[in-house]
Amino acid sequence: MNHMPQAWGRPRDDIYGGYNPSYLPYNKGGYQSHANGQPTTHTQSPIVTGTSVIAIKFKSGVVIAADNLASYGSLARFTDVKRLKPFNKKAIVGFGGDVSDMQYLDRLLSSLDVQENYGSSGNGGDEEAESRAMMSAKNLHTYLSKVMYKRRTDFNPLWNALLVAGLDEKSVPFLAFADLLGTTYSSPTLATGFGAHLAQPIMRRAVPDEEASQKLEREEAVKVVKECMKVLFYRDARSMNVYSMAVIDENGVDLKQDIKLEEQSWSFAESIRGYGTQTV
């Protein structure tokens, strides 16, 4: 330490080197060119967001769904945002959370897909060999979880909750979660946002464990997901009645967009008590 009266308590320049002011703004003697003279900052909270993504396994694949609404705060601003992004014939990603970060990850996955296609050797039209060489949903989830964790450790997280659905290397149904902290886990039913509170109980009633998912038929899984999307529209103020749904199995990704809820009925609202002025 420097014990000279004019600089008492500071590290000595002749031992530790001069103080590096590069991170400071111009008005403090540094080199940062931020408009208001403050250090560069990162996103502290998401602005335009998408709500729930839900998914459920069945015996030969996975069904995943998300609505098309992107909300600007509490304003239902954008009504045509597709939050299910197919990666290849084995995997699809569902995005909840910040839409701009979703677009960044979508570009990242597009670049990865190009590298995978150009980096793999030709298989002479052998579809089986091509399928084995294709990146599985499990590998894609590992990649995305590392991206999310790296951004978290940079104190610049991607404000998303991701569901990765598809087939693993052995063509077994795969479903897993990753969030802005790099937290990961897998389950036969998964949901982000309000879906974790409203849709999970419905899906767990149909598929309480892995053994039950191996007995569930495709048609039953689609029916459960449609029922969950209806409940979310009724109960989640950040959802809408138009959504996308994909089924991933050994035949590839069957993605349907702009599906409208069927058989809507608000008659249940008459029996609700505890909201607003009640006359009974």
Image (cartoon, rainbow, N blue to C red):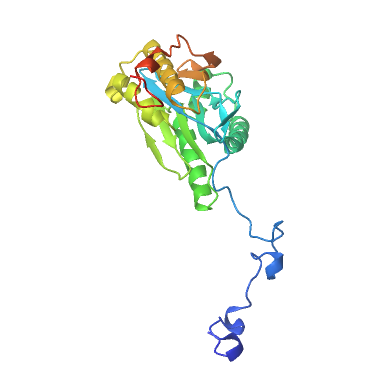
Q: Identify the residue at image location x=28%, y=24%.
A: 208
Task: Judge from the rendering whether residue 76 lies leftward or rightward of residue 32; answer left or right.
Answer: left
The quadrant in which residue 265 appears is top left
Q: Identify the residue at image location x=43%, y=14%.
A: 266
Q: Identify the residue at image location x=65%, y=66%.
A: 24
* Farthest residue, direction front: 279
Taking depth in this image into account, of 277 and 71 the one nearest to the observer is 277
Residue 107: x %, y % from top left:
62, 35
Residue 246: x %, y % from top left:
49, 19
**What count of labels does the image hold?**
0
Residue 78: x %, y % from top left:
61, 27
Image quarter hosting the C terminus? top left
Taking depth in this image into account, of 181 and 196 the one nearest to the observer is 196
* Farthest residue, direction top: 263
Task: Judge from the rendering whether residue 166 lies leftward or rightward of residue 20; answer left or right.
Answer: left
Residue 245 visible in this rendered orientation of the protein: yes
Q: Tell me: residue 42, above or below residue 89.
A: below
Residue 207: x %, y % from top left:
31, 21
Residue 172 visible in this rendered orientation of the protein: no
Taking depth in this image into account, of 50 and 87 the one nearest to the observer is 50
The quadrant in which residue 170 appears is top left
Taking depth in this image into account, of 103 and 51 the one nearest to the observer is 51
